[in-house]
Image (cartoon, rainbow, N blue to C red):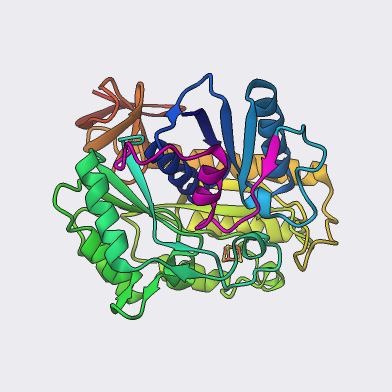
Amino acid sequence: MASFSIRFLGCKVSQTDAQEVRERLLADGHVESERADVAVVNTCCVTHEAVRKSRHAVSRAARTHRRVYVTGCGANLSGDAFAGMPANVTVIARPSEETPEVVAGDVGAIGCVQDDARLERVRAFVKVQDGCSFSCNFCVVPLVRGRSRSRRAAAVLAEIRRRVTQGHREVVLTGINLGCYRDREAGFTLARLVREAGQTPGLARLRLSSIEVNHVNDELVAALRETPTLARHLHVPLQSGDDRLLRAMARRYSSDTYLRRLAGLEDFNLTSDVIVGFPGEDELAFRRTLRVVRLAQITKVHVFPYSPRPGTRTAGADPVPAATKKERSARLRAASHEACLVRWRSKLGTEDVVLVDRPGRGYGDDYSPWLVDAPVGELVRVRATAVLEEGILAA
Ligand code: SF4
């Protein structure tokens, strides 16, 4: 038996992949521990900074663990992002579906002594789809994750039932390009999956992780509206509000399309990703992004200062100075924070149900952050009494 620790960097899909490796090691009888023999680091490569942080996490783990396995997107990046690491570091450059098996095989199985391993109980991330068949010009994800493929609906629904039985109150459907979800044989689109997943007995809340605006169509919106357990939150990447840049990114929508598709979802909390300093972004283009963020009533924006990724169509271009990216990123983050405060203030005096996911904190139905005094894992009905810089104060 080995003891192991596991961490991930990056998105919800990376978190889900780390969870799958963890489950597999627990199922094989290994024990999770802070002071472990083996460390698994599920890495990210979406930006240059993400690779730097991943490398840092791996070198730190190599100093404190006997063996370190590097998995995830960073491990699959061309050009060996982990060259020069200590001898106790093994890079597992395999598709996510194969990674748990490969890591477990190397750590050494000792038999299935725990075939229903329990993980973090608060919120379960259930991967329904992986990979992406789009080809946005800046994006390395299709190169490291491959083409889009979906899990069978029956397997997804069974996993959701299992997670609920394990005590998870909230389930998040995750995927690299969630809207591409299809189980053609069983006749499932994402909309049907949402409807059926949302009816899982005992499930308190269903959430979508991130969805491309082109997939926010009438069928999906109807499913979101008609599924009572569905959280009123959508994360819809914008990347830019400037049509010239959207074309240069090969994003397949215009700023008008983005706004039109989200019109009518005002009761949902909209959050987004934006790339700042993409090649060709001038002040006017950046202001157009600020405008679309405002018009769409986006609250939280995850700001990604552009960094060229190896193997992508824009790998050779990075003309916007770092100082300009920094300054625009700060302006966008400030606008985002102000939009969050506006939404949070609008809740003063109203009630929500908060899932407490760490001491003193949790998220409401629409993914607004609340400051609450309740045990971790509880779903608590609260009333908003004040708004602080970090969230809504609950009573
Ligand atoms: S939709 Fe575009 S940005 Fe998103 S994973 Fe696919 S290629 Fe990357």
Q: Is residue 93 magenta?
A: yes
Asked if 229 appears above or below 21 in the picture, the reply is below
Q: Horizontal placement of 29 versus 319: left or right? A: left
Position in image of residue 198 (x %, y %):
22, 58
Relative height, residue 303 to residue 372 (above, below): below
Q: How many marks?
A: 0
**Residue 283 position by quadrant:** bottom right
The magenta region covers: 89-117
Q: Nearer the viewer, residue 356 or 107?
A: 107
Q: Is residue 142 visible?
A: yes
Q: Of all residues shown, which one is farthest toward the front?
A: 110
Q: Position of residue 12 (x, y in %)?
A: 48, 48
Give above or below for 298 relative to 392. Answer: below
Instruction: Give the x, y percent position of residue 62.
Output: 69, 28
Question: Which residue is most to the left?
Answer: 201
Residue at x 75% of width, y 51% of height: 307
Residue 22 point in image, percent of width and height: 45, 39
Q: Residue at x 29, y 54 (%)?
A: 159
| Residue at x 15%, y 47% (from the top left corner) | 202
Q: Is residue 254 magenta?
A: no
Residue 260, visible in the rendered structure:
no
In depth, the one of 260 and 87 nearer the eye is 87
> 394 and 51: which one is in front?
51
Ligand 1 located in image quadrant: bottom right
The residue positioned 50% from the left and 28% from the top of the image is 2
Quarter the C terminus occupies? top left
